[in-house]
């Protein structure tokens, strides 16, 4: 389960997704922090050819349904794809196909193979951004302000050549759903009925991992 990741700079977002985004104070993000995510454009003229395929937003890392205290973000930063459709925190976002992409330079996971946790930086082997499949929510705060949030979707990784090396021995191995670039638009526009078709493992040979000693 991914609780720490490195968000891209506005320049990287512009380069890879063609969206403008203001610089943010922190790029190393943990649950409860604010970070960028991408979703399909909303409230646009379908005949406007100038509309970009992505809309950049800032949201809390950790899904926050309308009924939730903000502290819930500490436990909703990842969503198990197998149960997201029925779990109270995620089911509305799943049912409404509120799909998003969380761009990341790298994610960090603990490697316990030596007997102690060694933080490990995992990124794409080709240097491109990771496009992580997620769900987003939008709600109003007590002050009436708009608040967005997101969660990263995960799949089982017990048999993944790389990701099975992380997390405590004896625990189920999980990994975030990294989307192939060719499927970015398909994921953002997919109806809920086929969301599960995107929940696959990213090939191990297209990822690299470096211990942070």
Image (cartoon, helix red, strand yellow):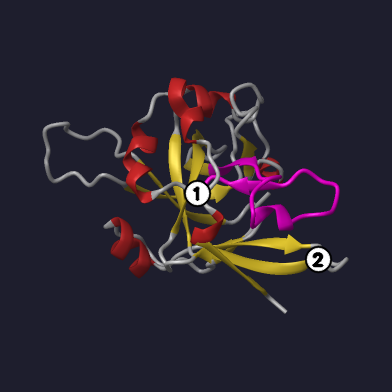
Q: Give the number of marks.
A: 2
Asked if residue 187 lies left or right of residue 26, the reply is left
- Where 79 falls versus 61 (above or below)? above
Image spot of residue 60 (x, y percent): 55, 49
**In the image as oriented, which residue stretches furthest toward the bottom?**
213
Indicate the quadrant where residue 117 lies: bottom right
Asked if residue 57 lies left or right of residue 166, the reply is left
- Where 8 falls versus 45 (above or below)? below
- Residue at screen point 84% across, 68% down: 114
Circle 2 — which element?
loop
- Residue at screen point 43% across, 68% down: 127
Image spot of residue 152 (x, y percent): 56, 44
Q: Who is closer to the viewer here, 213 or 134?
A: 213
Magenta residues span: 150-177
Mark 2 = which residue? Answer: 117
Q: Earlier in the sequence, mark 1 or mark 2?
A: 2
Whether residue 2 is in magenta: the answer is: no
Image spot of residue 161 (x, y percent): 64, 54
| Circles 1 and 2: CB atoms closer than 8 Å | no
Q: How far apart, in angstroms, are the residues tagged by discs 1 and 2?
A: 23 Å
Mark 1 = which residue? Answer: 178
Q: Who is closer to the viewer here, 196 or 89?
A: 196
- The mark found on residue 154 in the picture is none
- Residue at screen point 63% across, 29% down: 82
Asked if residue 132 lies left or right of residue 120, the reply is left
Image spot of residue 177 (x, y percent): 54, 45
């Amino acid at each position: 389960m991914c609780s720490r990741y490195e968000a891209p700079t506005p320049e990287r977002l512009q380069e890879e997704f063609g969206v403008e985004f203001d610089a943010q104070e922190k790029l190393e993000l943990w649950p409860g922090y604010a970070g960028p995510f991408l979703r399909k454009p909303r409230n646009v003229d379908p005949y406007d050819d100038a509309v970009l395929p992505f809309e950049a937003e800032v949201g809390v890392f950790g899904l926050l349904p309308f009924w939730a205290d903000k502290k819930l973000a500490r436990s909703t930063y990842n969503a198990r794809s197998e149960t997201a459709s029925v779990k109270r925190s995620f089911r509305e976002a799943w049912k409404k196909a509120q799909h998003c992409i969380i761009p990341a330079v790298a994610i960090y996971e603990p490697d316990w193979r030596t007997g102690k946790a060694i933080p490990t930086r995992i990124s794409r082997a080709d240097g491109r951004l990771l496009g992580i499949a997620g769900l987003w929510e939008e709600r109003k705060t007590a002050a009436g302000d708009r608040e967005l949030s997101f969660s990263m979707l995960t799949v089982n990784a017990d048999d993944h050549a790389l990701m099975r090396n992380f997390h405590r021995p004896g625990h189920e191995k999980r990994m975030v759903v990294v989307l192939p670039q060719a499927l970015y638009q398909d994921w953002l526009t997919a109806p809920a009925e086929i969301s599960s078709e995107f929940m696959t493992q990213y090939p191990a040979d297209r990822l690299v991992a470096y211990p942070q000693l």
